[in-house]
């Protein structure tokens, strides 16, 4: 995987038109942005391009308008909020075809250091299919392309891959650079011992990740709903716990693979069990801790137990690199969040480089207040998973090599 990419620090954009793909896919409620983390995260790259004297043209998708204009998914509120965060106007180019008369006129009139924002790139049906016409429209606006949207890096779309192939200079922004440095290098050339922790509900979602990480890491820890299929593969009674019977043989293979490679594979030794799944998800539940080898037939495991929490925390203590993707239990329920909290605590207390793969684990770490204790929290769930699988990400690959 070529991870040595040119970044915004390797180029000079003075007087040039720069198209910068950001991830402004923020949650909106009644036209107001309810979480602006992604806007704040994009500021360093935008400020750098402004300071260099570039003409900065921002673009992003928002939600899934599926190739047609949906007013409730317009990026207009983002332009307004970005103007406030940057302390200078971000002019919004309201064009349903994204690169329309408004956008073209705005770009023609730009002075160095000014910023405009294009409309939602997914208003165009070509966007998600990487269709040539829209890529050409985007490329016609700029001299330089900067990709700072890791959240869509695993998808080949017009606004991150198509346009990059049509401009001479295509580089990554600071956010992308950080993701490549942490996630990419953790997997490709980790400082050892390297411990990987996988959780979440389904084994099926993580097949390739488990396979790839077993080859790269020293210790692989498995918790969350996916652990019960592994426990069943070892011949344990798992009661009514979540299980994927079609993947039991796969789990047996992985257990054998770990042994053959001399890797430690840690599974839960005890579980917090409940009678029936909470409804609503944060409802009060009556719990009982059981050994993994002796779970009652009428109960299901919904979190790792205290012995497992200790086992997993111990494995983290001696690590130099830790990657964590997926919660240890039903962390949305306070009673069933203790395993996830224990792992987050262990990561917060270690001196190792700690990397949180996006999605639920990022949400858990932030909700539980451990965010600032981690070396890196990935901004992309799907993209970070594909990085952990060892796949090449089209959005990264499209940038110029150093």
Image: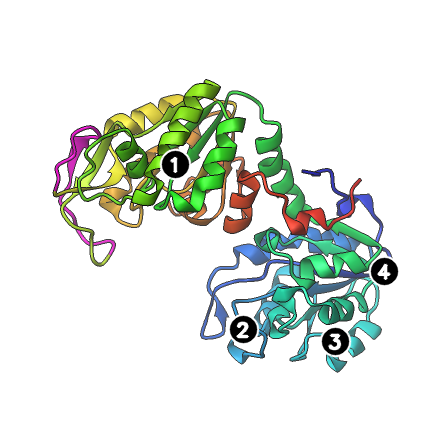
In the orientation shown, which residue stands out farthest toward the right? 15
Q: Which residues are magenta?
A: 281-297
* Among numbered discs 3 and 4, the one appearing first in the sequence: 4
Q: Is residue 251 left or right of residue 54?
A: left
Q: Relative to 225, is 398 on the left or the right?
A: right
Looking at the image, which is closer to me, 212 or 277? 212
| Front residue (pair 156, 354) | 156
Residue at 80 percent of width and 78 percent of height: 105
Residue 279, horizontal then vertical, whole percent: 20, 57
Query: Which x, y percent locates residue 238?
Result: 21, 37
Which residue appears at 77% of the width and 57% of the height? 165
Which residue position is annotated with label 4? 16
Which type of secondary structure does the marked residue at label 2 adopt?
loop
Image-quadrant location for residue 346? top left
- Magenta span: predominant SS is loop
Mark 3 highlights which residue? Answer: 103
Is residue 356 positioned above or below 94 on the image? above
Q: CA distance from mark 3 to mark 4?
A: 16 Å
| Crowd rating for badge 2 (residues with CA inside 10 Å; few <14, some 14–19, many 20+) | some
Q: Which residue is mark 2?
A: 65
Q: Kindly indicate whether the residue at mark 4 contacts the one at mark 3 (C-beta within 8 angstroms).
A: no
Q: Earlier in the sequence, mark 1 or mark 2?
A: 2
For the residues labelled 3 and 1, say whether their Cβ atoms are less than 8 Å apart. no
Mark found first going from the N terminus, 3 or 1: 3
């Amino acid at each position: 995987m070529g991870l040595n990419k040119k970044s915004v620090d390797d180029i000079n954009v003075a007087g040039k038109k720069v198209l910068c793909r950001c991830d402004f896919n923020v949650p909106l409620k009644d036209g107001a942005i309810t979480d602006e983390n992604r806007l704040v995260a994009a500021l360093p790259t935008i400020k750098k391009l402004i300071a260099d004297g570039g003409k900065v043209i921002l673009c992003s998708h928002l939600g899934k308008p599926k190739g047609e204009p949906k007013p409730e998914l317009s990026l207009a509120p983002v332009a307004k909020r970005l103007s406030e965060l940057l302390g200078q106007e971000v002019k919004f180019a309201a064009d349903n075809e994204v690169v329309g008369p408004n956008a073209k006129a705005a770009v023609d009139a730009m002075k160095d250091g000014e910023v405009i924002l294009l409309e939602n790139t997914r208003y165009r049906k070509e966007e998600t299919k990487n269709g040539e016409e829209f890529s050409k429209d985007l490329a016609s606006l700029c001299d330089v392309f900067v990709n700072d949207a890791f959240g869509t890096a695993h998808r080949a779309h017009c606004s991150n891959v198509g346009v990059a192939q049509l401009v001479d200079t295509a580089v990554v922004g600071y956010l992308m650079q950080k993701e490549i440095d942490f996630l990419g290098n953790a997997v490709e050339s980790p400082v050892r011992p390297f411990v990987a922790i996988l959780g979440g509900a389904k084994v099926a979602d993580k097949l390739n990740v488990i396979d790839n990480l077993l080859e790269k890491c020293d210790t692989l820890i498995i918790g969350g709903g996916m652990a019960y299929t592994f426990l069943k593969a070892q011949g344990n009674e798992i009661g009514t716990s979540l299980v994927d019977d079609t993947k039991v043989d796969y789990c047996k293979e992985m257990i054998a693979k770990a042994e053959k490679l001399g890797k430690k594979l840690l599974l839960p030794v005890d579980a917090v069990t409940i009678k029936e799944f909470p409804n609503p998800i944060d409802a009060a539940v009556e719990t009982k801790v059981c050994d993994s080898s002796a779970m009652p037939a009428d109960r299901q495991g919904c979190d790792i137990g205290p012995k497992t929490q200790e086992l997993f925390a111990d494995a983290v203590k001696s690590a130099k690199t830790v990657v964590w993707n997926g919660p240890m239990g039903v962390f949305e329920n306070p009673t069933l969040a203790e395993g996830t909290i224990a792992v987050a605590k262990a990561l917060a207390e270690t001196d190792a480089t700690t990397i949180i793969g996006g999605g639920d684990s990022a949400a858990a770490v932030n909700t539980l207040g451990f965010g600032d204790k981690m070396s890196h929290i990935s901004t992309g769930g799907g993209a970070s998973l594909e990085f952990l699988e060892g796949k090449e990400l089209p959005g990264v690959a499209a940038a110029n090599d150093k």
